[in-house]
Image (cartoon, helix red, strand yellow):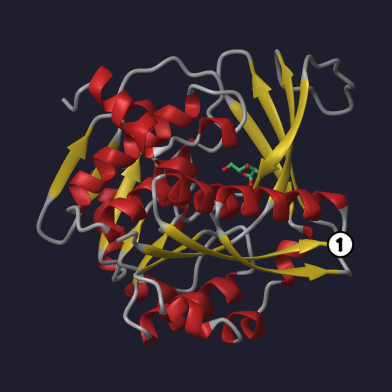
């Protein structure tokens, strides 16, 4: 039986330009190739979970423009139950992605219609949320909407997974309602009020997030893998060493895989291990959607690079 996952979050069209270096302030720089494709952390995570076999209910908001039309085509093709409003006041969200030759990126988002997703929209979908086992949510929509989604999920006994990206300070009441928080190290620092240069160990970051009331913390560490922290234990899992073509969406692939594994009854460590492979698979392809693994593709990657 497929598991049921609710994803509440963003859709952005991704406008990717490949380039050699960051332009300076006031400079116009000639880039290389340009690619346009679907993105947004919410939608990417929904597609990732769906390709791994889950029934995904995706709740979002897009504009009345052709980018919004493209989003609907994507969700239909991917077999995702989409509960998405068309906002005639705002453009569909846009993510401008600068992709550097060494495999790094920088992303700038104009949220547009994502910020129109409201408490009322979620209330109208309460039964849909209640029918799922896990809620997966990110921070590319209004914090108020995120908080309300989490409250609805808790009311109906769902497990709540929050991927705090793009990171921003959160109200303290949110942490005790989160079962699994999945920051990277920079995001973890921001969540505890430290700046990104602060010299704090990953273990201490996780400990501080646990003290805020979060059930468990999975700190993603890019190519190194992830650290899993609960009140009683700290553990690590490694990611497979693959050639990075485009890291965009690797975190989304990780989160989509994590929730499918958790809903299927894997332990948090097992789920994080599997999710590292989902993230790595995504990084091997240009753009996000082509890199999101099917179950077969993920199993093949595990066969080629067995767990360490
Ligand atoms: O996580 C990657 C995503 O972040 C991109 O798809 C971009 O649209 C931004 O939302």
> Is 63 placed left or right of 175 in the picture?
right
Q: Name the residue under label 1.
A: 64
Q: Residue at x 66, y 48 (%)?
A: 74
Q: Whole-percent x and y of residue 213?
A: 29, 71
Q: Whole-percent x and y of residue 283?
A: 49, 26
**Pointer 1 residue Cβ closer than 8 Å to ligand 1:** no
Mark 1 element type:
loop
Mark 1 surroundings: few (<14), some (14-19) or many (≥20) residues within 10 A: some
Question: Which quadrant, please, contains the N terminus?
Answer: bottom left
Q: Whole-percent x and y of residue 224?
A: 31, 27
Question: Which quadrant, please, contains the C terminus?
Answer: top left
Q: Which of 29 and 73 is in front in this view?
A: 73
Which quadrant does ligand 1 occupy? top right
Q: Residue at x 31, y 81 (%)?
A: 157
Res 166 seen here = no
Q: Which of 193 and 284 is in front in this view?
A: 284
Which quadrant would residue 176 be assigned to in this image? Answer: bottom left
Q: In this view, does 249 lie above or below 239?
A: below
Query: What is the number of callouts on the image?
Result: 1
> Is 221 placed left or right of 26 in the picture?
left
Q: In this view, does 177 lie above or below 303?
A: below
Q: Is residue 299 above or below residue 57?
A: above
């Amino acid at each position: 039986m497929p598991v049921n996952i609710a994803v509440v979050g963003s859709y952005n069209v991704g406008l990717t330009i490949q380039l050699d270096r960051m332009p300076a302030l006031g400079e116009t720089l000639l880039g290389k190739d340009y690619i346009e494709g679907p993105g947004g952390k919410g939608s990417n995570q929904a597609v990732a979970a769906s390709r791994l076999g889950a029934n995904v209910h995706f709740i979002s908001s897009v504009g009345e423009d052709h980018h919004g039309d493209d989003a609907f085509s994507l969700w239909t093709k991917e077999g995702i139950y989409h509960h998405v409003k068309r906002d005639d006041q705002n453009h569909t969200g846009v993510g401008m992605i600068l992709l550097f030759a060494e495999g790094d990126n920088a992303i700038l988002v104009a949220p547009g219609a994502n910020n129109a997703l409201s408490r009322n929209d979620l209330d109208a979908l309460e039964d849909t949320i209640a029918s799922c086992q896990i809620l997966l949510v990110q921070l590319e929509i209004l914090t108020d909407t995120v908080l309300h989604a989490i409250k609805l999920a808790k009311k109906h006994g769902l497990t709540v997974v929050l991927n705090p990206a793009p990171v921003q300070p959160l109200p303290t009441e949110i942490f005790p309602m989160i079962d699994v928080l999945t920051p990277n190290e920079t995001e973890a620092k921001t969540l505890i009020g430290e700046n990104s240069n602060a010299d704090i160990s990953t273990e201490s970051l996780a400990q501080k997030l646990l003290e805020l009331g979060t059930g468990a913390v999975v700190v993603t560490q890019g190519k190194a893998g992830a650290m899993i922290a609960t009140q009683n234990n700290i553990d690590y899992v490694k990611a497979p060493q693959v050639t990075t073509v485009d890291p965009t969406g690797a975190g989304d692939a990780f989160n989509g895989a994590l929730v499918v594994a958790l809903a299927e009854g894997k332990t948090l460590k097992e789920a994080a291990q599997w999710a590292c492979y989902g993230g790595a698979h995504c990084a091997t392809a240009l753009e996000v959607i082509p890199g999101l693994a099917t179950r077969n593709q993920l199993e093949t990657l595990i066969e080629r690079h067995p767990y360490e």
